[in-house]
Amino acid sequence: MAVYTTQKTYHTKAHMGMIDVTEDFQNAVKESNLSAGTITGFTTGGVAALTTLEFEPGLVHHDLKAALDTFSPYLDERGRVIPYRHHDTWHDDNGSSHIKSALLSPFIVVPFVNGKLTLGPWQNLTLVECDTRDRVRDIVFQVMGE
């Protein structure tokens, strides 16, 4: 089994900023010269995530953030940062970010056949920034197959 690894850097926006990285996954598969197998994308940030979703404005700019804020809100109704015990450890404000990224995942695995990702028509691979600040994030792409 052959393995090809590459990496790309992204500039993300705080509080659930999202980047469509589908083309970067497909490019890594193409660069690997493999025809069938799987590609794993892994983001090296502790509070970033990878997922699939329909990359449309409602989901990207509102719905996913609103849903995850239900489980792990950042601010209370008065606009104050909600205390998490994580803040006591590191004296920061991103406890909710860690929960959001854990509910998603730092990695995703996608099969490919004949050099093409096996995604549905409305399925985009998406990098999600869960932190409270803009960040620079890397995705490591590892392609395995034949």
Image: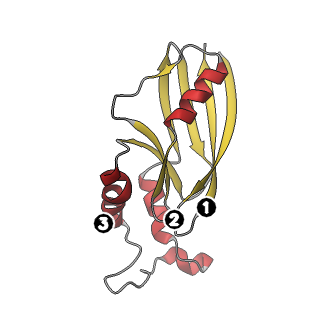
Determine the CA span between mark 1 and mark 2.
Answer: 7 Å
Determine the CA span between mark 1 and mark 3.
Answer: 23 Å
Write down the residue under mark 2.
14
Q: Amino acid at mark 2?
A: Ala
Q: Residue at x 35, y 81 (%)?
A: 76
Q: Which mark is residue 19?
A: none
Q: Pointers 1 and 2 in contact (CB under 8 A)? A: yes
Q: Residue at x 42, y 37 (%)?
A: 124
Q: Residue at x 54, y 17 (%)?
A: 115
Asked which secondary structure carries label 3, the reply is helix
Residue 35: x %, y % from top left: 56, 13
Residue 12: x %, y % from top left: 56, 57
From the viewer's perspective, tell me whether residue 32 is left or right of residue 134. Answer: right
Residue 9: x %, y % from top left: 66, 47
67 shown above or below 108: below
Q: Amino acid at mark 1?
A: Arg
Q: Of residues 128 and 94, which is closer to you in this image?
A: 128
Figure coloring: secondary structure
Q: Amino acid at mark 3?
A: Thr
How many numbered discs?
Answer: 3
Write down the residue under mark 1.
135
Write down the residue under mark 3.
70
